[in-house]
Each structure stands twice: as structure tokens, then as C-alpha cells.
Image (tube, rainbow, N blue to C red):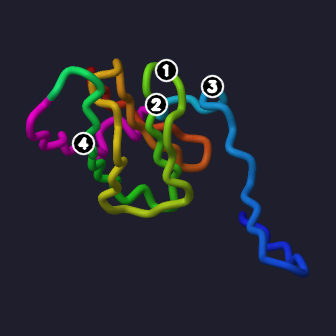
Amino acid sequence: MATQVKNTNSDWLFFENIQPIAVYHQDPSLLEDDFSLHLPIIKNLVRSGTLADIAVELPDAGRSCNLYMYVDGRKSDLYYNVGPGVYTFKNVSYLSGKVEFFYVTGVRKSRTITLE
């Protein structure tokens, strides 16, 4: 749960700690869900650091989720506390290596979708 703290100069919003991904275990019941990946449409693909926008469709998991993007085994981006829909990760260095997407709901982790 997010906790709002008032400051005399501004409002600060604090979020619960996001656990390291090793804490979560893949849940077999999430293996056959609707988690799907829309591959980017890239024009003039250049092999030297081309950036792409990658849209990921998140299924209805029954509660809010954290949607992760890992690049080369490190967390690169995250949509926090989101519901079903299409989410776009912008300016991803598509040719840098392995790009992985998965979501976590509660303590359950979905399967991972990988682009290499």
C-alpha cells in the first residue's frame, strides 16, 4: 500500500518496498494466461544501439500487478501496481542483448517472455 506523507513544501508519495525478484517463485497457474508480447515495429533498423518501443499486454490477474522489464539480467524498468491493459516500454536498446518481461501479483510470478 502506498502511504502519503505531507511535507510543508510538497507532497511525497512513498511506496512499499519492491522485493528482489529471487523472492518470487514462478506460479504454474500463471503459465497458461494471456500474457502476450507485441513485437516492436522498427523502421531503419541500425545495429548500433537502435532503440525501440515494446508494447506488452497484461492479462487480468484478478488484482494489480508489477510488470517488469529486465535487460541482460538486470531490472531496467517497471510498471508498478497496474491492472490489465497494454503497457509500452519506450527507448529500449533492443539489440543490446536479452530483454525479458514478466509480472508479479502478490508473491506469484508469471512466465517470462524473452526477446534476444
Residue depicted at 60% across the width and 31% down the height? 21
Name the main secondary structure of what is drawn in magenta.
Answer: loop
Kindly report which numbered mark, 1 or 4, lies closer to the viewer in this rendering: 1
Task: Look at mark 1 in the image and give the residue it sits on.
Answer: 73
**Type of amino acid at the residue the image marks with label 4:** Leu
Residue depicted at 42% across the width and 32% down the height? 28
Q: Are marks 1 and 4 in contact (CB under 8 Å)?
A: no
**Type of amino acid at the residue the image marks with label 2:** Tyr
Task: Look at mark 3 in the image and give the residue it sits on.
Answer: 22
| Magenta stretch in the rendered image | 28-45
Q: Do the residues labelled 3 and 2 touch (CB within 8 Å)?
A: no
Give residue 9's position: percent from left, percent from top: 85, 79
Count every numbered label the image shows and give the total. 4
Q: Quadrant of the N terminus?
A: bottom right
Kindly report which numbered mark, 2 or 4, lies closer to the viewer in this rendering: 2
First in sequence: mark 3 vs mark 2: 3
Image quadrant where residue 3 sits = bottom right
Is 41 one of the magenta-colored residues? yes
C-alpha distance separating marks 2 and 4 = 14 Å
Bin the neighbour count of mark 3 within 10 Å (Cα to Cα): few under 14, some 14-19, many 20 and up: few
Q: Nearer the viewer, residue 44 or 90?
A: 44
Judged left or right of residue 49, residue 101 is right
Give residue 84's position: percent from left, percent from top: 37, 62
Task: Look at mark 2 in the image and give the residue it sits on.
Answer: 70
Bin the neighbour count of mark 4 within 10 Å (Cα to Cα): few under 14, some 14-19, many 20 and up: some
Residue depicted at 45% across the width and 61% down the height? 62
First in sequence: mark 4 vs mark 3: 3
C-alpha distance separating marks 1 and 2 = 6 Å
Q: Which of 113 and 8 is in front in this view?
A: 8
C-alpha distance separating marks 1 and 4 = 18 Å
Task: Look at mark 4 in the image and give the residue it sits on.
Answer: 37
